[in-house]
Amino acid sequence: METTVDIVIAGGGIAGLATSLGLHRLGLQSLVLESSESLRAGGFGLMLWNNAWRALDSLGVADSLRRHSLPIKDFHISQSMSISCFIRNIECRCLRRKMLIETLEKELPQGTVRYSSKVVSIEESGPFKLVHLADGSLIRTKVLIGCDGVKSVVAKWLGLEKPVVSKRIGIRGFVEYPEKHGFEPKFFLLIGVGVRFGILPCNDNALYWFYNFTPSIAGFDQSAKKDPVKLKEFVLGKIKNASNEVKGVVERTPLDCISCVKLKLRLPWNVLVADIVRNNVCVVGDALHPMTPDIGQGACSALEDSVVLARRLGEAFLLKPGGGVGDEEFMRIRNGLDRYGKERRFRSFLLISCSYLIGFIQESDNRVVSFLRENFLARYTLAISLGMADFDCGKLVFS
């Protein structure tokens, strides 16, 4: 069966839902194709910086989310010497991924998200794109937006290279206390050779923690990846010199709230030279710029993408409305997506590059890098992170 939809979004994660909501705020309908049977509300914590909250303000959901999170104003970085830094004029909060996903989905009109709809291939039919789904159905669309993550079918169709493994691993944990956990609203970060461990309070009762490391340096048993008991023991062994309060966070984390993933990224020069937009097709979020989590910009930059793209498509569809699907309309769509690509290409390159570089500096076992890190670089890497977060994607308005 074939159906026709003006705008199709492949993927119902943060990028897909935020893009659809941005379009909805402008009065444009879209169809979100999600491969899973229900909303993918899993995952643990998200560090959302200033740029993310500006995007969420534009989408009209920031205030409701702020009520469920604590503002983080203080950073404590511990290595051979400890550094504390109070940040001003930057909004930083840790939010549970489930809350963000559910909030975005609830703001969409019923029926916007179509579940159990896996995109398997794409073909061209004149200026239209034909989207083939695993169930045999076919959707004809004027615009196809790939928000389908690191294994994006849309990115592959555009010719983008597969993301590469960074040779690092991330362990994540989330713990809720029956009463207040007692941690101050600050970001605690422990860095050293092969190691990057952090704790972030989401609210008065919940904490998110992460442990990023280089397996070859940390002596990690690869067979432990799917064993939360071994993962917990491994992390506790690596932070054995931390305070009892910090170790207690990991100790009381439920086993079903611990996960392990390989850290991947798209090679930054691939974003610069390859097609991230082609005619009426583009990519957003992890389909565009998967990156290591070292500056906490994965979800933040996806929200930026969504607002910018919604604004550009709003210009294409709404500034010169008219019936039919003639060449003029497709030219406006193409121009709008080209403008989106120009705005996001270099920004994506910088985010991927800075994230990888900071992760390398903070975990390197190179003697020179280790010496510089322990004596000079901690404040500079934090300054870079804050600089990348101080970005404004703009409002959902156009002229």
Image (spheres, rainbow, N blue to C red):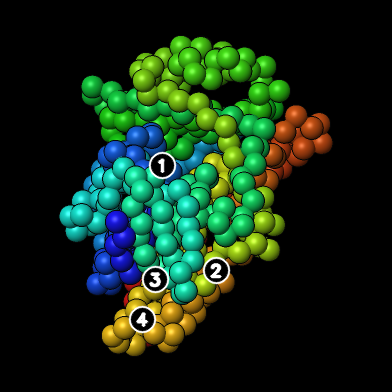
Badge 4 crowding class, 10 Å Cα cut-off, few under 14, some 14 to 19, many 20 or more, is: few
**Three-letter amino acid code at the position of disc 2:** Arg
Residue located 31% across and 60% down the image: 2
CA separation in Å, label 3 and label 4: 8 Å
Residue 70 position in % (x across, y down): 32, 43
**Three-letter amino acid code at the position of disc 3:** Lys
Q: Quadrant of the N terminus?
A: bottom left
* Residue nearer the viewer, 66 or 285: 285
CA separation in Å, label 3 and label 1: 33 Å
State the mark number for residue 325: 4
Tag 1, which secondary structure?
strand
From this view, report whether residue 40 is shown above or below residue 272.
above
**Three-letter amino acid code at the position of disc 1:** Leu
CA separation in Å, label 2 and label 4: 18 Å
* Location of mark 1 (residue): 46
Badge 2 crowding class, 10 Å Cα cut-off, few under 14, some 14 to 19, many 20 or more, is: some
CA separation in Å, label 1 and label 4: 40 Å
State the mark number for residue 142: 3
Tag 3, which secondary structure?
strand
**Left or right of residue 373, residue 73 in this image:** left
Residue located 43% across and 19% down the image: 250
* Location of mark 2 (residue): 278
**Three-letter amino acid code at the position of disc 4:** Val
State the mark number for residue 239: none
Residue located 44% across and 66% down the image: 129
Whether residue 251 is visible: yes
Residue 215 position in % (x across, y down): 66, 23
CA separation in Å, label 2 and label 3: 13 Å
Q: Nearer the viewer, mark 3 or mark 1?
A: 3
